[in-house]
Amino acid sequence: MRTHLVGVALASAILFAAQTSNAQEVSTDRPVQVGFLLGGEKTTGTFASGGAFGFAWIAGVQAQVPLPVRRLAFRSDIAYHGYVTEHCVFAVQPGGGSSDCGNNPLRSVLSLSADLVVRLNDPKTSWSPYLLGGGAFYSGSSKVGGLPSSAGVQEGFGFEIRPARRWIVFAEWRHMGMGSGGMSAVTLGARF
C-alpha cells in the first residue's frame, strides 16, 4: 500500500512539473553534478524483527543529471553501509523461510542505486524540497564471506539548498526496500 501511495505521489509530481514548465527548456548551469553523502540508517520490517535491530553509518558518492523537463533529474549513487552492531539482515530467505545466521552476522552492505528526482520548486530557486524514487542493488558481506545479493525499490524525500551558484547542500530520508524488510536512511551531503 505504501509503495502504491509513493508511486501516485511521484506520478502526480511529474505531471505537475510537466504542466508548469517548458518541456523543451533544459537547465545548462550545471549539466552534471557530482558529490558525496554521509549519514546513518536502521533496518526495518522483518530484518529488524526479533530484536536484531541494526544500525549502520553510510558514506557514498553520487552523480545527478538534469532531464529535459526542468523539475526532473536522474541520480545515481554508490554507498558503503558499515554496521555498528553485527546482525542478521539477510536471515529471511526467498519464499518466506528463515535461516540462523548467528555464526555469520552482517558486517557491511554495498549499494548501487538509480533514482528519478522530482523537485517541487524550479531548479533556478535557491532551495527546493524534492521526492525521489527508483531501484537499488545491494551486496552484503559478513564474518565468513559474501552474502546473497538483493535488489529492491527505494523511495524518499529531501530538501536542498543552493548557497552558491556551483554547489548544493542536501538532507534526505529514504527507505531502501529488500523484500519484506529494508533500510531506513537519513543522509546529508553536497553536490558540485
Image (spheres, grey):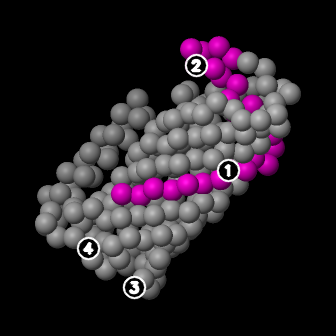
**How far across and how far down the image is residue 81, in percent?**
67, 50
- In screen coordinates, is 39 left or right of 62? right
Q: Using the rendered view, name the quadrant where residue 127 is placed.
A: bottom left
Disc 2 to disc 1: CB gap under 8 Å: no
Q: Which residue is mark 3?
A: 165
- Asked whether the viewer can see residue 53, the reply is no
Q: Mark 1 falls on what kind of element?
A: strand
Q: Which amino acid is tagged 1?
A: His
Q: Quadrant of the N terminus?
A: top left
Left or right relative to 48: residue 94: left
Q: Residue type at mark 2? A: Pro
Q: Nearer the viewer, residue 136 or 162?
A: 136
- Residues under labels 4 and 3: Cα distance? 13 Å
The earlier-in-sequence mark between 1 and 3 is 1
Q: Residues within 10 Å of mark 1 (few under 14, many from 20)?
A: many
Residue designated by label 4 = 27
Report the residue at 26% width, 45% height from top: 11
Q: From the image, tell me which residue sits under label 2.
A: 94
- The span picked out in magenta is 74-98
The residue at which mark 1 appears reads as 81
Q: How many neighbours does mark 3 have within 10 angstroms: few (below 14), some (14-19), or many (20 or more)?
A: few
**Residue 119 placement (x, y as % from top left):** 33, 62
105 horizontally vs 12: left or right: right
For disc 4, the neighbor class at 10 Å (few under 14, some 14 to 19, many from 20) is: some
Q: Amino acid at mark 4?
A: Ser
Q: Earlier in the sequence, mark 1 or mark 4?
A: 4
Tell me how far mark 1 sits from mark 3, CA to CA: 31 Å
Q: How many marks?
A: 4
